[in-house]
Image (cartoon, helix red, strand yellow):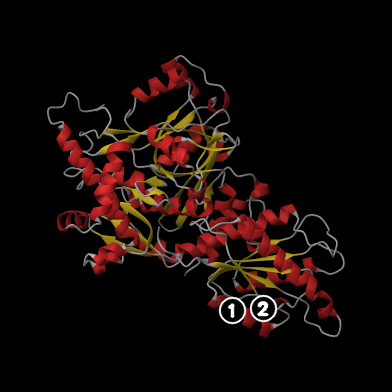
Amino acid sequence: MLKINYPKIGIRPTIDGRRKGIRESLETQTMDMAKAVAELLESKLFYPDGTPVKTVISDSTIGGVKEAAASKEKFDKENVCGTITVTPCWCYGSETMDMTADIPHAIWGFNGTERPGAVYLAAVLAVHAQKGIPAFGIYGADVCDADDKSIPDDVAKKLIRFAKGILAVGIMRNKSYLSIGNVAMGIGGSMVNADFFQNYLGMRNEYVDMTEIVRRWDEGIYDKEEFEKAMKWAEKHTPVGPDLYNSDDPNRFTDKEKKAQLADCVKMAIIARDLMEGNPKLAEKGFVEEADGHNAIAAGFQGQRQWTDHFPNGDYMEAFLNSQFDWNGIHAPHVFATENDSLNGASMLLNYLLTNTPQIFADVRTFWSPEAIKRVTGTELTGLGKDGFLHLSNSGAQTLDATGEEKVDGNPAIKPFWQVTEDEAKRSLEKTRWIPANIGYFRGGGFSSNYLTKGGSQGMPVTMSRINLVKGVGPVLQIAEGYAIDLPEQVFNVINERTDKGWPSTFFAPILTGHGAFKSVYDVMDNWGANHGAISYGHIGADLITLASMLRIPVNMHNVSEDKIFRPRVWSLIGTENQEAADFNACQTLGPLYK
């Protein structure tokens, strides 16, 4: 896992600066609000390594510009990635606000009758809008008593949603996206746009040719002890499965050749990880430069076709980098994009940083209507699949955590690595076959993971997202919440035989709203902006919308209910009736976060 100095959340208690009784009477209440927010966030949120999130509270309440400046100085030293200002009372807005323009801000104005916290909230949000430094406003629906130290549920939800977003922003900042190779098969997302990563995500781009993998093979630039350990594990836990594609092909590979390919695939996984995050053991072997890595929080591998026409495909490497278990046990996943689709990689990264769970990278492959299902299988689906579904599948590069063998409350799930049990990891491996690659696609051989995502009786809640680039507009984000569903066995068998039966399958039923792109499952497919999607466990659409507004990426398609949408207050000054138009206008007017 990439070693990261994780950012902290800054909490700013602002106060009425007038002395001789007013400020003094509010000190305890104001600082108690800050402490309550810190306790909430530190108990509910975790960094990607599983440790609790850290907060920093200003050394004193902030009643004027001198204390505001002192707070900023402290936060700069503490690596603060966003601020939450709290107050129960009137304060002097422009004197107490945080004017740092390249981190997100939120203000919680206490809803009480004794002091006008709501008045300050409205006043300081107006200053933020006027200065072009957007801030999120948090105001509870119910009046609270002045001595009530609890945080209302509606306020807590917004505080947590905001905090998740700023942590994602802060963790991405100054990290790298590593391209191993370049453009795969003319796919737009693998035409890596450095301006997008720099201006919107605060990231840099790193590039290596795919021949770097061959060089490290040939020159032994990998941990050979780890490789021997990994090979023993791979032969036991990822045995080569039946050849579903090439049995009649005279060019099919021998068992000996497949064993050699498996060894190459294991080396590829080790080498790609080392390229991303470095490996101090390489320095011990004399490879000091290679030991540093590229500080990459996400990466992609071109593969097709220059690599896969000659060498084993990248599916084994990509599947295990995206998974939370391998020969080194259970650990945090990487974010690794097939075909170097950097836009899907960026989508996976946003999802991952909001959830700490590994991501499914998949082709948005086929729409199955109820009529088509009935025609080819003779079955009329009920339940979540009654309106049809999307078949999500690629050649086997997605996380193995998506088998559905991990459980939450007895239901299929994808969990953070620190919650995954040894038995769950073992079952996921047992449910995965490694099918020799179709040499019509992959002349160099390799292996495709093959499993079926379990949805369970309730369906596994998932969210599919995708960033696309539009000339003249910039990045836009699509979001579709829904469920991974189970199909009756006879239906699955027919559908599986009609597609690539050696690849993994996830059957996705999006939640329909009856309008726009969500009038029908067909409309979801018809409006999807690219051939790939990033699929995350849970319904995280509202969190993605909040995060996108922080980065100034407009959302052009979503099925999140209006009451869950949380954006900076200035968005409502641009428009309230058409939120999508207001989102586009706000993002265009303000420009990217790191402009």
- The image shows residue 34 at horizontal and vertical percentages of 70, 68
Q: Which mark is residue 587?
A: none
Q: Is residue 5 left or right of residue 518?
A: left
Element class at badge 1: helix
**Mark-to-mark CA distance, 1 and 2:** 8 Å
Return the residue at label 2: 59
- Residue at figure coordinates x 20%, y 28% from the top left: 246
Return the residue at label 1: 74
> Can you tell which quarter of the image residue 93 is in?
bottom right
Q: Earlier in the sequence, mark 1 or mark 2?
A: 2
User: Where the N terminus falls, by quadrant?
Assistant: bottom left
Element class at badge 2: loop
Q: Residues within 10 Å of mark 2 (few under 14, many from 20)?
A: few
Report the amino acid beneath label 2.
Asp
Report the amino acid beneath label 1.
Lys
- Residue at figure coordinates x 55%, y 24% from the top left: 386
> Can you tell which quarter of the image residue 223 is in?
bottom left
- The image shows residue 407 at horizontal and vertical percentages of 53, 37
Q: Is residue 438 left or right of residue 578?
A: left
- Residue at figure coordinates x 59%, y 70% from the top left: 133
Q: Is residue 229 visible?
A: yes
Q: Residues within 10 Å of mark 1 (few under 14, many from 20)?
A: some
Residue farthest toward the top in the current orientation of the protein: 378
The answer to whether marks 1 and 2 mark residues whose Cβ atoms lie closer than 8 Å is yes
